[in-house]
Image: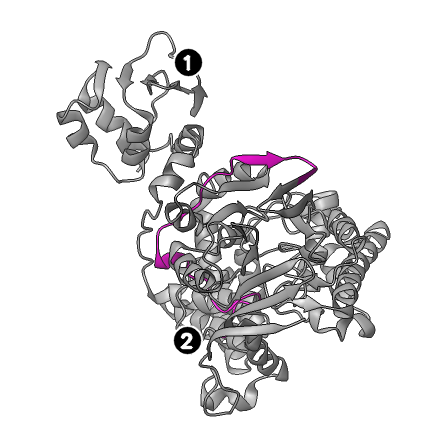
Amino acid sequence: MKIIVINTILLLFLLSCSENNIENNELDEQPSSVQLLIEHTKEFDRNIYSYETPGGNIHIAVGFGIANSIMVEGEGGNIIIDTSDSIHEAELIYTQFRKLNSNPISAIIYTHNHGDHNFGTSYYVNNQEKKPMIIAHESTDYYMQRILGILNPIISKRSTRMFGGTLDDKDLINVGIGKSLNVSKSPLGYVKADTTFKDELKLKISGINIELYHAPGETNDQIFVWLPKHKSLMPGDNIYKTFPNLYTIRGTTHRDVQGWVDSLDHMRSFNPQYIFPSHTKVIEGKNAMDALTIYRDAIQYIHDQTIRLMNKGLLPEEIASAITLPPELAASPFLYEFYGTVRWSVKSIFNGYLGWFSGEPVDLDPLSKKDKAKRLSMLAGGDEELFLELEDAIIKKDMQWSLELISYLESIDYKSNQLKSYKKEALEYIGKRSSNPNKRNYFLVSAQEIDLKPDDQRNMLTAETLNDMHVDTFFKILATRYNPSLNNNDGNIACFNLLSSQKSMIFRNHIIEITNTIAPNCNLEIEIPEILLKQILIGYKRPIESLATGQIIIKKGSSTDFLKLLSIFR
């Protein structure tokens, strides 16, 4: 085996006390685990690594964005596995890939729905004479539509916090599975797959035998790629060099932990010589099977012990405090808590099996936070006494308790300006001392938000991505943004002839029912091309101009009625 490192760019982090990312006057207070996190940044040195496997050359781009991008050389064509987190990163990567092999791209494979794996696709598509085949699991686009659609505002906000999207180089060490997220550098280049499968798919592309298998784990649509002649495994996000995100604090559907173990066992059955993960560096030789085994064992341990203590009646917080990895597992560099944590995983497993209710009667219908705050204040001797307790906690650097006291005082609106200052101090103190980048970045960005007004989100969809967003997604967004307390439209019906389809919005009982036909008795009926409606809804086109040029035809009602309808959803 021969490894060739192409175009090495040294990352500007140094481990000396005067040159790392932590403020000099805070170094003495840093736990050693933060220094380990700084050292972990080496895992994301920006390089193209090339491997001569038994079946041919495979190149992997590490450190360009959060996720790696992989190119497999074929006969007269190459295959790309995951396209990185943006068009900007895809251009940087593909420029290097073409120097190694200039054959056209025959196919692109998505390992799953996360944008850091597919937002660079349109760059590849637009730089080929013939559009490559795009392959994914049959449910991948469903999850993409949801991320781009109804959950976009909250997922974007929480992702910015978790990945430290607004932090400068002084505070952002890394994000655990990559150096930094670069989505904001260019438009989103997601392109919908044209070839999908349910359980497995075996095919030959450009002379390469490819086997694809559904492998639920970090996502429900996760797949892994097995290249039998290359003895090479591309596991997606089901293994990387850090404890897995069995739950992610940016928010996610429940992750099937037992299914994750089963998927790793499926991968082990192939006995790979090379593992090309979508995050962190390549694992090869005996280390490949060792890593798969210890990873699945750690996940099973957390799962099984959580279930054991659940069945004994312990509460989520009690279980999270009781479970730690055994020393022989905790010592593995694949299980350092640089991404997920045991305690977050335990709570997610509990919730996945039993839901949010702990089982304790007191937790079923608890007092509101405001009511609790008032009663806590009375116990303390009044609001001022509660505030003095906060100041004492700040002086003692008891910052988690400080944040909890601040939360109560905020709910009763006591000395809000001073609370902001203390909250920022507490968030920064905890954040800068956290060795888990998810927590670190989340706290530090939250501290920033206290003083900074967030910028308005920019629309960053390419033409391809906009075209691949279902019109159903747009109507679902409108329904979930409707606030009847501000503008109750009960009894009204708005109908849309989209030329290729029809939709009606029926306002009833403070909700909007969306139907796929023109409803009778429309108050407002509009004829508008589907793509134009999408462009108007995301701000690419102005509705007044489209009305003036005749691109929008009002068949019932008036132009004013149409503009008033749009204004409801701003």
Circle 1 SS class: loop
Q: Say whether disc 2 or disc 1 marks the residue closer to the N-terminus.
A: 2
Identify the image quadrant of the C terminus. Answer: top left
The magenta segment is: 173-202
Which SS class for mark 2? loop
The tag on residue 169 is 2
Towards the viewer: 246 or 400:
246
Does the magenta run of residues contain 296? Answer: no
Residue extending farthest top: 520
- Is the residue marked by circle 1 packed among few (<14), some (14-19), or many (20+) residues within 10 Å? some
Q: Residue at x 33, y 18 (%)?
A: 499
x and y, in percent, of residue 485 in the image: 37, 32
Amino acid at the residue labelled 1 = Thr
- Could you tell me residue 334's position as x and y percent? 70, 69
Quadrant assignment for the N terminus: bottom right
Residue at x-position 44% and y-position 66%: 445
> Neighbour class for label 2 at 10 Å: few (<14), some, many (≥20)?
some
Residue 177 on the magenta span: yes
Q: Residue 517: give its label.
A: 1
Considering the whole magenta stretch, tell me its main secondary structure.
Answer: loop
The x, y position of residue 28, in whole percent, is 55, 91
- The residue that appears at 66% across and 55% down in the rendered structure is 235
